[in-house]
Image (spheres, grey):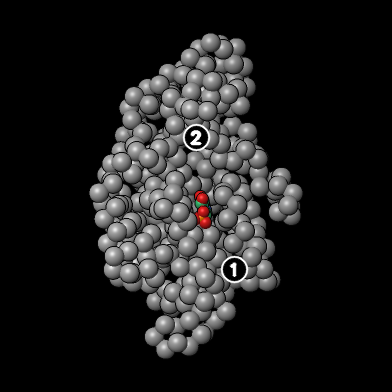
């Protein structure tokens, strides 16, 4: 169906950046620079500088950034790795593929890891933790680092949704042993297809990821050091991402303005929870604008009928996907989040008019159903 307000519009981003993107692609192709060339090195240098770390290694996905980080931290069979139940499945699959056991804990009402739940889940087998900075908000990294340090655990940040977000002035991906980023097309910094990066201050981990992404080969000596993977960030992709990275700070400011417009348009609607949490230590980048209501399914249906596109991240807890073979860890907050969340249109191209239409529809939905508000208020 065609929507009045689309969730995201990649055509509009391309229209706005056409000259820069076309140049990045054609210049790279004209030079024949397809694999492991200057464009990749430039992007890695600029990304590392942006994140505030010494090294960034381009890989072909956020998943591989996580997987290589876990391997670099020595995670394998017999290890337990703690992460949250409310995350994209790739976070957990990366743990499973190392042979380690994923231990899932619950989140706080800002959708990020609850540090006390993390602490309580540590066992003698725990070797690492993956805090996930969801929706463009960094976890409480003071508390998480304190727990991790107390138990001597490696911290691998899943920063796939939080490039540019900060906690106490430090950027996502710069707290732990590594920070893992995704450049999947709909991320704040989205590529032409899949892509990702490992950010780290540790030169040995940077070298490990550099070799693992290229079938284990040390390109200087030709020596193959590990059984690696075919997992490069392609050069054309890197050139385009580098061009887009220059716009990221202003795009994040735009996302924050859009979030504020949603807030103005939706504040006071009974039965609706908005994603504006304590902000004194946090600078949120609003990868997603997620609202919460017990009437999620009816609201989503209404928005669709009104021509407003929305998404749900995620409609059922991971362990209900039987093919994953995960035990139900009993996480009440994660379960109610799955029933209640809905993500509204949010991107660097989202306009004030689109917010007005979307917020107007949501207000109409609740106004035409006063019973819903009373039922919610009574609970
Ligand atoms: C929280 C989170 N972790 C990991 C990933 C995996 O990234 P990729 O899709 O680039 O493998 C994503 C991407 O969707 C994500 O949102």
Callout 2: SS: strand
Q: Position of residue 69 (x, y in %)?
A: 51, 68
Q: Is residue 193 left or right of residue 376?
A: left
Q: Is mark 2 within 8 Å of ligand 1?
A: no
Question: Could you classify mark 1 by the number of other residues whose Cα lies within 10 Å: few (under 14), some (14-19), or many (20 or more)?
Answer: many
Q: Position of residue 269 (x, y in %)?
A: 47, 19
Residue visible at 58% across and 23% down in the picture: 301
Q: Quadrant where the C terminus lies?
A: top right
What is the count of numbered marks? 2
Q: Is there a contact, CB below 8 Å, between mark 1 and mark 2? A: no
Residue 52: numbered disc: none
Question: Could you classify mark 2 by the number of other residues whose Cα lies within 10 Å: few (under 14), some (14-19), or many (20 or more)?
Answer: some
Q: Position of residue 225 (x, y in %)?
A: 52, 84
If you read the primary sequence from the N terminus, does the residue marked by circle 1 or circle 2 appear first? 1
Structural distance between the alpha carbons of marks 1 and 2: 33 Å
Q: Position of residue 14 (x, y in %)?
A: 33, 44
Residue visible at 42% across and 82% down in the picture: 219
Q: Is residue 326 above or below residue 265?
A: below
Instruction: Report if residue 324 is visible in the image.
Output: yes
Residue 127: numbered disc: 1
Callout 1: SS: strand
Query: Which image quadrant for residue 67?
Result: bottom right
Query: Which image quadrant for residue 82?
Result: bottom right
Q: Is residue 206 above or below residue 245?
A: below
Instruction: Report if residue 124 is visible in the image.
Output: no
Residue beneath label 2, please? 343
Q: Is residue 274 left or right of residue 95?
A: left
Residue visible at 38% across and 50% down in the picture: 189
Q: Which mark lies nearer to you, 1 or 2?
A: 2
Q: Is residue 270 left or right of residue 249?
A: right
> Which of these two is toward me, 66 or 153?
66
Residue visible at 57% across and 49% down in the picture: 88
């Amino acid at each position: 169906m065609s929507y009045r307000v689309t969730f995201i519009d990649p055509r509009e981003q391309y229209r706005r950046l056409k000259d820069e993107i076309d140049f990045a692609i054609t210049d790279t192709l004209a030079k024949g620079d397809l694999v492991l060339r200057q464009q990749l090195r430039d992007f890695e240098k600029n990304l590392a500088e942006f994140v505030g770390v010494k090294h960034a290694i381009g890989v072909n996905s956020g998943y591989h950034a996580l997987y290589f980080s876990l391997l670099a931290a020595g995670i394998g069979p017999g290890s337990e790795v703690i992460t949250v139940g409310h995350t994209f499945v790739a976070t957990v699959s990366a743990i499973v593929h190392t042979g380690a056991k994923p231990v899932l804990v619950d989140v706080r009402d800002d959708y990020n890891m609850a540090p006390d739940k993390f602490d309580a889940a540590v066992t003698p087998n725990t070797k690492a933790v993956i805090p996930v900075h969801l929706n463009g908000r960094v976890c409480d990294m003071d508390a998480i680092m304190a727990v991790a340090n107390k138990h001597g655990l490696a911290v691998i940040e899943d920063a796939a949704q939080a490039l540019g977000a900060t906690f106490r002035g430090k950027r996502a991906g710069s707290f732990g042993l590594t920070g893992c980023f995704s450049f999947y097309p709909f991320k704040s910094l989205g590529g032409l297809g899949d892509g990702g990066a490992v950010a780290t201050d540790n030169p040995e981990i940077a070298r490990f990821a550099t070799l693992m992404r290229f079938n284990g080969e040390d390109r200087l000596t030709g020596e193959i050091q590990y059984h690696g993977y075919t997992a490069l960030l392609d050069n054309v992709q890197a050139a385009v991402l580098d061009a887009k990275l220059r716009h990221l700070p202003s795009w994040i400011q735009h996302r924050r303005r859009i979030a504020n417009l949603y807030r103005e348009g939706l504040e006071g609607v009974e039965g609706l929870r908005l994603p504006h949490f304590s902000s004194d230590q946090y600078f949120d980048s609003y990868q997603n604008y997620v609202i919460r209501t017990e009437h999620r399914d009816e609201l989503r249906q209404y928005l669709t009928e009104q021509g407003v596109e929305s998404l749900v991240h995620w409609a059922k807890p991971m362990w209900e996907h039987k093919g994953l073979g995960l035990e139900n860890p009993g996480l009440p907050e994660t379960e109610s989040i799955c029933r209640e969340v809905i993500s509204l249109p949010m991107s660097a191209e989202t306009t004030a008019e689109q917010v007005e239409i979307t917020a107007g529809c949501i207000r109409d939905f609740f106004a035409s159903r006063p019973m819903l508000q009373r039922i919610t208020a009574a609970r």
